[in-house]
Amino acid sequence: MTDARRVVVKVGSSSLTTAAGGLDADRVDALVDVLAGARGPRPKEIVLVSSGAIAAGLAPLGLDRRPRDLARQQAAASVGQGLLIARYTASFARYGRRVGQVLLTSDDTSRRAHYRNAYRTLDQLLAMGTVPIVNENDTVATDEIRFGDNDRLAALVAHLVRADLLILLSDVDGLYDGDPSTPGTARIAEVGGPADLDGITIGSAGKAGVGTGGMVTKVEAARIAAAAGIPVVLTSASQAADALAGRPTGTYFHRTGRRS
């Protein structure tokens, strides 16, 4: 982990916004402080897969919760994406770092020409010292072509950019063998393969209502990345610095396959 040169970091809406919608500037700045200050034996190239566009657009549009219909979700994403990238731009600028916005649909990871072009763009951004901020193109994606959740998108982006490590940041500090709020449950430190998860109850999205995933999508994303030869750390956003430094934290998913 400490030797990882190219790292994909995914952060969810609940780690960046308030429950009522709208960006939490302090949370964004705290994450950027960690990412911009990441150090190790080798300089790290960071690709940030960030949710939060729809959640950021709720309050400005007068919406008190995430809408269920696609059209209003896309409207919220259109408003929120600009706010999200502007916040990241200002926050990374404190460290003299540039950011670049990259919006993807599932076609960009499944069609060869799109895939190659997306790789070239991301690779060039990293070569120029820019931090790519990746999100699903929610304003135009339809039900038929959506990734489903940015956890899955992060796993596919990690494969796309040939990452050495994927870090999934959540509001929970790892995978537990039951409901983390229930006494007696324990955090699972390592997952060597699917058999290690037999009998484990995995929860869905939390109560905040600003995200779409939950632990189940993070575990599935970890499986996708691990099968492609990319180790995964699942931990909380507050422990991102430990994950990037290679200190024991969260749940570590070992590689189960080779990079194709």
Image (cartoon, grey):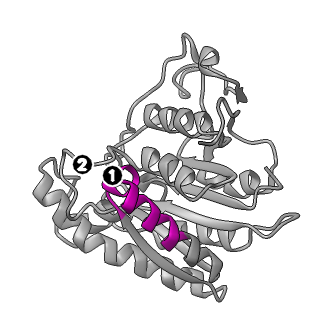
Q: Position of residue 176 (x, y in %)?
A: 60, 26
Q: Position of residue 26 (x, y in %)?
A: 53, 71
For numbered disc 1, what is the local secondary structure? loop
Residue 41 versus residue 180: which sits nearer the camera?
41
Residue at the outermost front position: 113
What kind of residue is marked 2?
Answer: Ile
What kind of residue is marked 1?
Answer: Ser
Q: Earlier in the sequence, mark 1 or mark 2?
A: 1
- Quadrant showing the C terminus: top right
C-alpha span from label 1 to label 2: 6 Å
Mark 1 — residue? 106
Mark 2 — residue? 145
Dots 1 and 2: beta carbons under 8 Å? Answer: yes
Q: Quadrant of residue 200?
A: top right
In the image: residue 41, left or right of residue 29: right
Question: Compared to 85, does 236 lie above or below?
Answer: above
- Report if residue 112 lies within the magenta region: yes
The mark found on residue 255 in the picture is none
Give, as a single range, the part of the protein colored magenta. Answer: 104-122
From this viewpoint, is residue 181 visible?
A: yes
For numbered disc 2, what is the local secondary structure? loop
